[in-house]
Image (cartoon, grey):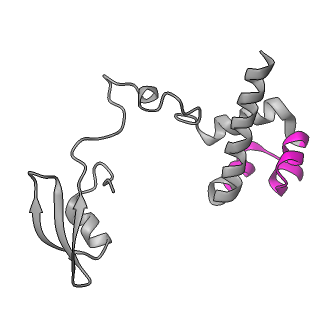
Amino acid sequence: MQLVHGVGKAELLIFLNIKMVAPQAACNLIFAERDANLVKIPVMTKPTHATPDAPALATQPRNPLHGMTLQAILTALVDYYGWPGLGERIAVRCFTQDPSIASSLKFLRKTPWARDKVEGLYLFMLREQKRQH
């Protein structure tokens, strides 16, 4: 388990409802007590996000979704399939009835299963484009 960079140990422990027993900075662990059990929680010491020296794409070079916004993914799908084609492939009302980028983004941000389907279709589209060229 890694902590989110910028969130302090104390804030995380309060969020998890854990009482800290003894921080061990040398081994990057927090020894904490939760429900009368002693647990060890690993603590991230370095940020995992991109720095100016190491661009974001270098952290996940084989992930085509890395760095892509949902809006960019949706726009690429609409350009490739069109709204009718997108509605046929993913049966969601926001693609079939009065579709727009704004309403679709609003729905997809609130609905994880639909977002997963859109991301999967985007990956399929990329593979399809690669085969055609």
Name the residue furthest top: 133
Which quarter of the image is occupied by the C terminus? top right
Residue 64 or residue 15, whichever sits in front: 64
**Image label count:** 0
Check residue 25 for magenta coloring.
Answer: no
Residue 64 in the figure: left or right of residue 11: right
Determine if residue 116 is in view.
yes
Residue at the spot x=91%, y=42% of the render? 84
Q: Main secondary structure of the magenta part?
A: helix
In the image, the segment drawn in magenta is 84-106
Residue at the spot x=42%, y=26% of the render? 58
Residue 27 or residue 99, whichever sits in front: 27
Residue 85, position as x, y percentages in the image: 89, 40
Residue at the spot x=59%, y=32% of the render? 64
Check residue 102 for magenta coloring.
Answer: yes
Q: In the rendered image, which quarter is residue 40 located in?
A: bottom left
Residue 28 or residue 16, whichever sits in front: 28
Determine if residue 98 is in view.
no
Residue 124, position as x, y percentages in the image: 74, 36
Name the residue furthest bottom: 36
